Image (cartoon, rainbow, N blue to C red):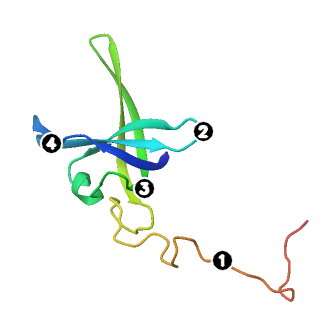
């Protein structure tokens, strides 16, 4: 799932020690534009914090996973970002080092056809 909006707040980074070693987490608030704008708190974990390099007023698209878990008969939901792309930028927290939309402008290339090409569609 993807959410696109503007970063309106960056919460302080939190870190600690777990059974698997040290961990880091930073949450940010993304405002989704609509007639009634919605605000979503999204978590970034580990190295993705540095890779995203978020600042207030950045326009971003966040690829997210939503997960709920139960603890002491209460349910907690977390929205985790696994990739964050800034608008107008090829920078992302994904594993590929390739620029998204390398054709320029962020739009995919368009294929055009001429009339003399055969139409092999059955309908």
**Residue bearing mark 2:** 35
Q: CA distance from mark 1 to mark 3?
A: 26 Å
Q: Secondary structure at mark 1?
A: loop
* Residues at circles 3 and 4 in contact by the CB criterion of under 8 Å: no
**Residue bearing mark 1:** 110
Q: Quadrant of residue 29?
A: top left
- Badge 1 crowding class, 10 Å Cα cut-off, few under 14, some 14 to 19, many 20 or more, is few
Q: Quadrant of residue 116?
A: bottom right
Q: CA distance from mark 2 to mark 1?
A: 32 Å
Looking at this view, name the residue that lies furthest to the top.
73
- Say whether disc 3 or disc 2 marks the residue closer to the N-terminus: 2
**Residue bearing mark 4:** 23
Q: Quadrant of residue 10?
A: top left
**Residue bearing mark 3:** 59
Residue 5: x and y in percent read 46, 49
Looking at this view, name the residue that lies furthest to the bottom.
116
Q: CA distance from mark 3 to mark 2?
A: 18 Å
- Say whether disc 1 or disc 3 marks the residue closer to the N-terminus: 3
Q: Is residue 55 left or right of residue 104?
A: left
Circle nearer the viewer, 2 or 1 = 2
Query: Going 41% across and 37% down the picture, which residue do you hit?
Result: 40
Q: Secondary structure at mark 2?
A: loop
- Badge 3 crowding class, 10 Å Cα cut-off, few under 14, some 14 to 19, many 20 or more, is some
- Say whether disc 2 or disc 1 marks the residue closer to the N-terminus: 2
**Closer to the camera, 120 or 41?**
41
Q: Secondary structure at mark 4?
A: strand
């Amino acid at each position: 799932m993807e959410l696109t909006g503007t970063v309106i707040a960056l919460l302080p980074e939190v870190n600690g020690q777990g059974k698997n070693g040290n961990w880091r987490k930073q949450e940010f608030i993304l405002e989704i534009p609509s007639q009634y704008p919605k605000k979503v708190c999204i978590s970034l974990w580990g190295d993705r914090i540095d890779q995203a390099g978020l600042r207030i007023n950045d326009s971003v698209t966040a690829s997210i996973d939503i997960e709920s878990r139960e603890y002491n008969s209460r349910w907690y939901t977390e929205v985790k970002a696994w990739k964050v792309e800034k608008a107008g930028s090829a920078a992302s927290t994904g594993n590929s080092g390739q620029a998204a939309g390398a054709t320029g402008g962020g739009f995919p290339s368009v294929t055009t056809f001429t009339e003399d090409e055969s139409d092999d569609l059955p309908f």
